Image (tube, helix red, strand yellow):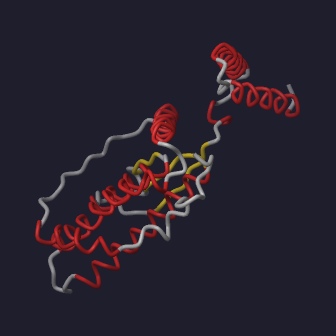
Amino acid sequence: MNEEQLNTVKRRIKKLLALSKSPNENEASLAMKMANDLIAQYKFNESDFSNYTSKVIKSTKRFVEWRAILANAVEELYATYHYKDVNTGSFVFYGEELDVFMSTEMFSYLTKTVNRMAKNNIRKNAKYNFRQSYRSGVASRLYDRIAELGLECSWRNPEQLAQQKNDISLWVHNQKELVNNESKKTKANMKAWMKGEIDAEGISLHRQMTGCGNRRIGGW
């Protein structure tokens, strides 16, 4: 089979996958079965037909708690899924293209903001644990604030958001064998943590969440 014929089959599979989302259960089930049969017959990779994309954000190999908190916060809002590459330390975000763009933009913005606040608000001779605890306190409060704003700013209603997050999580786990690389956490300096939580109240989130107001996709 030549390349043109293969592309014809791929287009057929994509149409069937689109039909598999039909509200008609029988039609959806039949379309999914036919798509899977063609994928198996021509030995395609399921990832060839996914609408998902990914983006890598560089980080350190060392586990940094506050970065992990921020990554979890933005994926909750934009229905993406991320993991930390054990070889490079980078964060890899997966999801629909616009969701990945928004997640990574927000993550980068907040990461830079937290680092800047730590530089400006913590004395230069402060110990590493104090600085990191402050950053974690900022990130923790941002996580809560993003959750509080989620219903207002998300492009999906709660049920759609939960379903999308579940779908992308399952898809990533089906495509990759993820390694659970949990690192030992150090005990936080609670004075620094609490200072970080207080200072986090001054960080603007609305400017970054372009889905706020009436600009929701789907217009629910």
Q: Camera-side residue: 36 or 134?
A: 134
What residue lies at 26% left-to-right and 75% top-to-bottom? 199
What residue lies at 53% left-to-right and 45% top-to-bottom? 156
The percent coordinates of residue 47 (x first, y second) are: 62, 35
The percent coordinates of residue 204 (x first, y second) are: 41, 72
Q: Is residue 176 left or right of residue 41?
A: left
Q: Is residue 174 left or right of residue 15?
A: left
Count all numbered tags in the image, as a single digit. 0
- For the N terminus, the image quarter is top right
Quarter of the image for residue 101 reads bottom right
Q: Is residue 16 left or right of residue 145?
A: right
Quarter of the image for residue 120 reads bottom left
Quarter of the image for residue 90 reads bottom left
What residue lies at 48% left-to-right and 61% top-to-bottom? 57
Q: Camera-side residue: 33 or 209?
A: 209
The percent coordinates of residue 130 (x first, y second) are: 16, 72
What residue lies at 27% left-to-right and 62% top-to-bottom? 141
Q: Camera-side residue: 111 or 218?
A: 218
- For the C terminus, the image quarter is top right
The percent coordinates of residue 176 (x first, y second) are: 48, 37
- Residue 30, compared with residue 151, is above or below; it is above
